[in-house]
Image: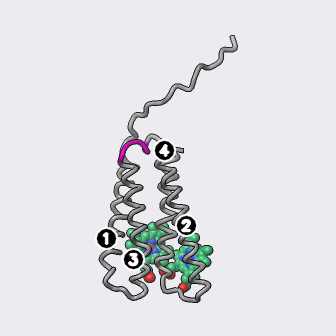
Amino acid sequence: MNSTASLFFKSGVLFLLVGLGAGIGMAASHDHTIAPAHAHLNLLGFVLSVAYGTYFALSPAKANGLLPRAIWGLHTLAVVVMFPTLSLMLLGNAALEPVVAVSSIVAFVAALLFAFVVFRPARATVTQPVGRVASTA
Ligand code: HEM
Ligand code: HEM
């Protein structure tokens, strides 16, 4: 698997662990106040990261260059900022709303760049020689 796909899977699975932990915490405490933050940590953080990672794993030619890394960086930054700030906002800290809004715009920009990568033609890749094919003659 290429490194961009691997990064998306690594960050995604960490978001999943925290997201499931938050779900179990809500269920155990019977306090569902942060349900939307939990939902979007799982959905944006795990589901979308794994979807992006799967695309880059299936299309290695599209994983070349800085842009896929930038998409990972922006998407991951958005989730890392959104979960705590949205949780605190839902718990009553209304002043954090602009930060949540900016994090969602950053996730949107990452999605726009991902759309650009999906639609642009793949760049030529330099393939490594795989060695001699044994002759049966
Ligand atoms: C250990 C696993 C999980 C537990 C214990 C859990 C627990 C919860 C709880 C207690 C709620 C609040 C329900 C309510 O107030 O009506 C909730 C909401 C939700 N959860 Fe989870 N959850 C888990 C995993 C997941 C996963 C993996 C996803 C998505 C991939 C997810 C997506 C959602 C969504 C979309 C909502 C609704 C949020 C909303 O109404 O704003 N959950 N979850
Ligand atoms: C920047 C990205 C996103 C923003 C700003 C956003 C915003 C919102 C908002 C404002 C709500 C309503 C919350 C509430 O009523 O308490 C919501 C609900 C929801 N969103 Fe998102 N969302 C985003 C991405 C996503 C993604 C990527 C998914 C799925 C992969 C998703 C799935 C859901 C679901 C399942 C609900 C809950 C619906 C319900 O329980 O009624 N969202 N979202």
- Quarter of the picture holding the C terminus: top right
* Residue holding disc 4: 59
The image quarter containing residue 26 is: bottom right
Magenta highlight range = 62-66
Structural crowding at the residue carrying mark 3, measured as other residues with C-alpha within 10 Å and reported as few (<14), some (14–19) or many (≥20): many
> What's the distance in space between the residues labelled 4 and 1, CA to CA?
30 Å
Which residue occupies 48% across, 30% down?
127
Circle nearer the N terminus (2, 4): 2
- Closer to the observer: label 2 or label 4? 2
Alpha-carbon span between mark 3 and mark 4? 34 Å
Q: Amino acid at mark 3?
A: Thr
- Colour scheme in the image? one colour
Say above or below: 79 vs 89.
above
Specify the farthest residue to the top: 137
Q: Mark 2 — residue?
A: 16
2 and 1 marks in contact (CB < 8 Å):
no
Q: Give the x, y percent position of residue 100.
A: 35, 75
- The residue identified by callout 3 is 85
From the image, tell me which residue sits under label 1. 102
Kindly identify the amino acid type of the residue bearing the numbered disc 4: Ser
Quick one: SS at disc 4? Answer: loop
Distance from mark 2 CB to nearest ligand 1 atom below 8 Å: yes
Question: Mark 3 or mark 4: which comes first in sequence?
Answer: 4
Q: Residue 91, position in %: x, y?
A: 43, 86
Where disc 2 sits, the SS reads: helix
Magenta region's main secondary structure? helix
Whether residue 74 sits left or right of residue 49 in the image: it is left
- Secondary structure of the residue carrying numbered label 1: helix
The quarter of the image holding the N terminus is top right
Query: Residue 27 got which mark?
Result: none
